[in-house]
Amino acid sequence: MPGFPRRSAGRRLQLPLLCLLFQGATAVLFAAFVRYNHETDPALWHWGNHSNAANEFYFRYPSFQDVHVMVFVGFGFLMAFLQRYGFSSVGFTFLLAAFALQWSTLIQGFLHSFHGGYIYVGVESMINADFCAGAVLISFGAILGKTGPTQLLLMALLEVVLFGINEFVLLSLLGVRDAGGSMTIHTFGAYFGLVLSRVLYRPQLEKNKHRQGSVYYSDLFAMIGTIFLWLFWPSFNSAPSALGDGQHRTALNTYYSLSASTLSTFALSALVGGDGRLDMVHIQNAALAGGVVVGTSGEMMLTPFGALAAGFLAGTVSTLGYKFFTPILESRFKIQDTCGVHNLHGMPGILGALLGVLVAGLATHEAYGDGLENVFPLIAEGQRSATSQAVHQLFGLFVTLTFASVGAGLGGLLLKLPFLDSPPDSQCFEDQIYWEVPGELEEEAQGPLRTKEPDTRA
Amino acid sequence: MPGFPRRSAGRRLQLPLLCLLFQGATAVLFAAFVRYNHETDPALWHWGNHSNAANEFYFRYPSFQDVHVMVFVGFGFLMAFLQRYGFSSVGFTFLLAAFALQWSTLIQGFLHSFHGGYIYVGVESMINADFCAGAVLISFGAILGKTGPTQLLLMALLEVVLFGINEFVLLSLLGVRDAGGSMTIHTFGAYFGLVLSRVLYRPQLEKNKHRQGSVYYSDLFAMIGTIFLWLFWPSFNSAPSALGDGQHRTALNTYYSLSASTLSTFALSALVGGDGRLDMVHIQNAALAGGVVVGTSGEMMLTPFGALAAGFLAGTVSTLGYKFFTPILESRFKIQDTCGVHNLHGMPGILGALLGVLVAGLATHEAYGDGLENVFPLIAEGQRSATSQAVHQLFGLFVTLTFASVGAGLGGLLLKLPFLDSPPDSQCFEDQIYWEVPGELEEEAQGPLRTKEPDTRA
Amino acid sequence: MPGFPRRSAGRRLQLPLLCLLFQGATAVLFAAFVRYNHETDPALWHWGNHSNAANEFYFRYPSFQDVHVMVFVGFGFLMAFLQRYGFSSVGFTFLLAAFALQWSTLIQGFLHSFHGGYIYVGVESMINADFCAGAVLISFGAILGKTGPTQLLLMALLEVVLFGINEFVLLSLLGVRDAGGSMTIHTFGAYFGLVLSRVLYRPQLEKNKHRQGSVYYSDLFAMIGTIFLWLFWPSFNSAPSALGDGQHRTALNTYYSLSASTLSTFALSALVGGDGRLDMVHIQNAALAGGVVVGTSGEMMLTPFGALAAGFLAGTVSTLGYKFFTPILESRFKIQDTCGVHNLHGMPGILGALLGVLVAGLATHEAYGDGLENVFPLIAEGQRSATSQAVHQLFGLFVTLTFASVGAGLGGLLLKLPFLDSPPDSQCFEDQIYWEVPGELEEEAQGPLRTKEPDTRA
């Protein structure tokens, strides 16, 4: 293709070799360690005297499918807003998530369900693996367009391990509650990506400003991502909750929170927009903040009003973040946050963690009745007071921020290895370096670009 | 943006202030009245001696999610067929539905589940709230492109209340059966929108004819809406049906009815099309009429053949409506029905109500066995004959038409308040008045327009 | 429309008349034969002493909905990659599947559930009908762009019957296991389509080469199809499996297999691509091969490692097929395989059948415990050894290939009937012959075409 620098064989071969290596390695580890659990193994399941209706599959699989759609369709298309980076957004999401879910099955398995030398898998491990893939994709959002697929796979390799350890520390060691992952998924994924973006700072990126925007149809594709994320977020937060009232209440709270964040996003977007116009970036992203903000507290006694208030606040903070904070993040802190994950996952994630601190601190035996055992087992068993649970929740937030920041610092150094196939500044936010793009785009896409670079026309 | 009139501060601030006001008001009302029901409250649920598997969540939530997709993806993208109104179609659907579901939770709660001073919520209230949002979006379809978001929110404010009262009169006072809402949702939403469109009649709209059509990709986006609506309609109609055979039979009937309306739509579209060509407008809309027409009778003993026949008829009537009746509606009755909701929801809704009259009138103890209690409790309990039930069903249709027409008449006067931020004729069907549209569209969109207005080129 | 030949009335009327005839005929047959089964009939269901929670609906309907999305959204949009054939891809998928599911309900009903003169229907018949529609759409993929809707309906008429008979021979007569349809759906559908394409060979198609490619947005629409197929494939393979561990294990195996085929597809695509670039055709298709390859063995004791290995192999073979084998298929064997169904469904289907032979041959009472009854009832009951089951599985593959090839040979002769409304070579891969296409396309689409046909410009 004229005008595009050919890559050396050493760079061209990185992606295929890394894919083959990673797939081979996970396959070997699967062979050694991964086994069907008692709900998926025919001998184990039929040895017990269960009714088939009692199989976990029927309680979790519909939620899993919704989460699965969010991870692949939701994140993939949400990131397809860039005018010349749709193939990469959707395609690399596909690749990264497909690797992350295998790798995470191993890491989370070693940490959470390693018994007698084996990892046992079923629908719960599928949900957890998809959750981890979600965190990786959040980080991807911060560095979208500025990294090659090899770098992204290496990021996933590292991030999945750190995600698993952080999750283990929070949920298993600290007894923190975080069903929908305000901390473990959103805060972790966002700050991991932001610190990574800081380390990979590219001062010359301004020149590509035209490619960092959307065009009409790319915005509509992105809305497919937004709407599916919005619709299935109640399933996301409730997927790992306790069965019965736990899943039910979590879904309901998330539903209310999202509806409120949508209204506050429209309000704020019109308020701060030029001539009162709405900005698609806000609608596509900030309207989702209501799902993030109740990730921790959604299973608790948040109350329907509490869900509305939380969502309202999250939508407001997120929209204002896009308008006022993202520019500062780049100019002052040298953090180029392509998708604004700080506004959608970072700040709302922290708010969600703090809301969890508050609602946990207010927990009483009276409010939860015998359901307390499911939401706060340590309080129900008398091992902890509500205040102590709240303090643990808060500590979990700091642990998460620490893991994300330090881990991403190391990750950034890894991704800066000079032989890695990273796109040059001039080819950032551009599909053609990694994809065979059908002819028309070249013609069409050059058009609008030229019109914005008058000096090249003369 | 050059060429676009700037709006005054009074108009620019209407949307943000209305969003904030409405969200604030619903939040206050939620705080005062809305509580978790016994399936979502941990203390209440665990006080009873239920198995977690018995929680309503597992029987209704998958259906709810399908309905949710229909309301937000289905209606949103179906209306995105307009070439320069995709942001508004998808975005205002998002806004309207997010408000309507909160507001409807309150209104339906006061009317249907107000006990001891509180509204109790759970997955059934989520389904009902989404149903009401669906009716609001049907009305939106009739006035699409000709109203601003402020007007739409005011419409929703009024329509949700009227929807709730009409539903209460039909289901609770008259004992009418209408699980899938042929009357309460489709007929009500369509005629509300049509009367509204009549009151808001704009004689000068002809000039915008070029913007009222589709372009190639906008038609493909609209097909996303169509197909998801078509796929999940069996869940829509069956979501509130009685558990067990009721939900199962309703889904099955809807599945057959839709497949028949698809074939009749293709047949009729090719038959009346120029040179035998198919018209995307028909395929996108009339193929769905099979879902509308079995909304009332889907849970009854319609029989598989009855479902096919009903769907066939609905697809036929709907396609012919688009071809022959919509033009008359505008020229003769001054009703500008942007999406043709009269053809997709209006006529098939009335047909569906009449089909319900017929099938209810044929109900026998023999055909339904002990299942009669679930479908026609009043007949099963001996309070009503099948004929009497049929008469009540018919009366329900007239009540619905009355509520919709009178209510929309009032609504139209409200929406005509001169200070409301309504788009001028020249800016109808145009995203740029309410949205910051990425640059490319301006260039591209002007292109085709100019080629169709040769006099402006000279 | 200038430049397009008008069709004669005899041709124009074929589609509407065939639709009406087919719909009328299925309706009459439904009236005569199709009845609600004991889970959908109110009298039958309530006569038994079931809990409503035991209704098959709750175990199968969520899977059905996922399958439904795959058939209509998945196949429809996957085939929308062609730059000027999006309306036809999505629209004819819609039409074909809507007819096929009715017709298949009858054919499969006569063969599998005909008792006392009636066919009894419920959620299982819905799943099976959708499966058959899937096979028809696979065949459609091979002849995409080269046949008119009348021909496609005739193809469906014939293929559904042959599909039903082949399925009956395999599952009922030979006792072959094939839950996810590696043989009955994928192998059958692919080779039926390929042989059909051979019979309908058009030597002059080269001239349309420019229309057989994609453009940027058509590739993104196709990715919607890909991703939804990928996401819901675990539901596809597990939809008809035994309840409990059977469905659970099948979903899990498919999930792993797909993740591995995704990585191997990315690896191979970059390896064989020009300058190491990824090819969208590979990603859109070969990444799905992991779902096809475990269609037979997914419910068996494949083990998680086995699933990864199978997926890896399938993705590799499929990608290499697109790169090296498809061109030979056309040049050497005169098979023009528009969507490359040989690579996505054909070869992976055969691999999947062989994998089923292997895994069935390794079945032991020890590995399956009491679950053996559900997976291999004939082995569990002592009527067959594992080796004998393996031989039967292998024989099933040959039966399938024979039925598909001979049937498609006959079908090809039917579709070549000279009076059928088949597109001329010059109008292949072109929406405008069957659809009213909005104006813009004509302008836009001519553009890129002209630029590629310099001789017509001069």
Image (cartoon, coloured by chain):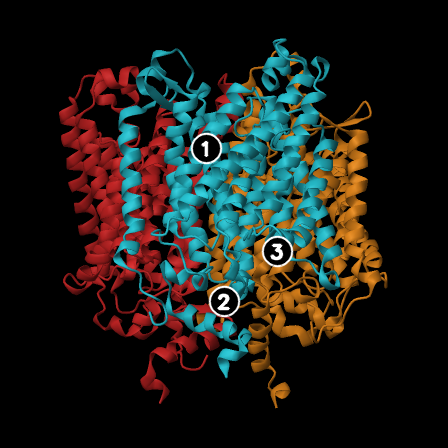
Chain colours: A cyan, B orange, C red
Residue C102 visible to an observer of this rendering: no
SS at mark 3 in the image:
helix
Q: Amino acid at mark 3?
A: Ser
| Residue hosting label 3 | A331
Q: Amino acid at mark 2?
A: Tyr
Q: Position of residue A139 (x, y in %)?
A: 50, 44
| Residue hosting label 1 | A162
| Residue hosting label 2 | B216
Whether B243 is drawn above or below C80: the answer is above
Tag 3 near tag 1, CB within 8 Å: no
- Residues behind callouts 2 and 3 on a single chain: no
Task: Using residue A379 as the reference point, say whether residue C195 is left or right of it.
Answer: left
Q: CA distance from mark 2 to mark 3?
A: 41 Å
Q: Quadrant of residue A301?
A: top right
Q: Nearer the viewer, mark 2 or mark 1?
A: 1
**Residue at 45 percent of width and 44 percent of height:** A412
Task: Using residue B228 as the reference point, say whether residue C183 is left or right of it.
Answer: left
Task: Using residue C152 as the reference point, say whether residue A302 is left or right of it.
Answer: right
SS at mark 1 in the image:
helix
Q: CA distance from mark 3 to mark 1?
A: 29 Å
**How would you rate the neighbour count of disc 2 (Cα within 10 Å): few for under 14, some for 14-19, many for 20 or more?**
some
User: Which quadrant of the figure contains the C terminus of chain C?
Assistant: bottom left
- Chain ID, mark 3: A
In the foreground, C259 or B75: C259
**How would you rate the neighbour count of disc 3 (Cα within 10 Å): few for under 14, some for 14-19, many for 20 or more?**
few
Task: Using residue A448 as the reference point, say whether residue C144 is left or right of it.
Answer: left
Q: Position of residue C408 (x, y in %)?
A: 22, 54
